[in-house]
Image (cartoon, rainbow, N blue to C red):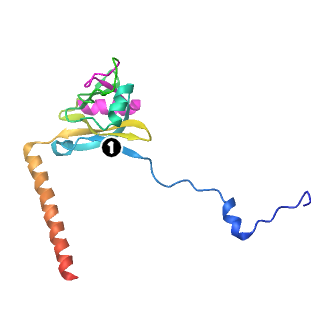
Amino acid sequence: MSKGATKQVPEAWAHLNKPKKPATRGPLRTVVASNKKARHDYTIEDVFEAGMVLSGTEVKALRMGRASLVDGFVLIDRNEAWLEGVHIPEYSNGNWNNHAPRRKRKLLLHHDEILRLGRKVQEKGHTIIPLQLYFLDGRAKVEIALARGKKEYDKRQSLREAQDNREAHRAMRERTKLGE
């Protein structure tokens, strides 16, 4: 071949020279624990995703899928967010350097988010609760929510609405089955 000539590629091989497209799937999210009772007891107003500062044995215990968010809450102290009351049990294969199960854990949030949450919590009836604990691309994250506590009659009303919606969907499904 001469110096300036380009090599001709047969059409059957043309697909081999095209760049590969990256996968269109989203980030891998592995849920470790969720607070199912939170949406029943609270009205969720705003949701945030925060990173957590963990020790090595805490990460290993979380990867085993062991955690409880039931008694968890978030405190804002000196412009820092702290997760308290969350139970991550000790790692069974840990040594003398194991972690305390219910220790305070620092949350990683933007400064303006912490200030906004701090202002809202000072209002009567607002609190910050953890909703989910999960791994996102290998990093431990917690989904926290700014919430307002429900009264007992609000809880009954929301249960009644959910039951009415289930009955309506069931009736529509029965109706479409009969029509076919």
Q: Position of residue 173 (x, y in %)?
A: 19, 72
Relative height, residue 43 to residue 6 (above, below): above
**For the residue labelled by badge 1, is the local secondary structure a helix, a strand or a loop?**
strand
Note whether 23 is above or below 136 in the view shown.
below
The residue lying at 17 percent from left, 35 percent from top is 125
Q: Quadrant of the N terminus?
A: bottom right
Nearer to us in this view, 35 or 57? 57
Q: Is residue 102 magenta?
A: yes
The quadrant where residue 167 appears: bottom left
Q: Which residues are magenta?
A: 97-121
Q: What amino acid is labelled 1 in the image?
A: Val
The percent position of residue 166, horizontal first and vertical second, equals 16, 62
Residue 179: say if magenta. Answer: no
156 with respect to 100 (left or right): left
| Image coords of residue 161 (percent x, y) | 13, 57
Q: Give the residue furthest to the front.
A: 93
According to the picture, the residue beneath numbered tag 1 turns out to be 31
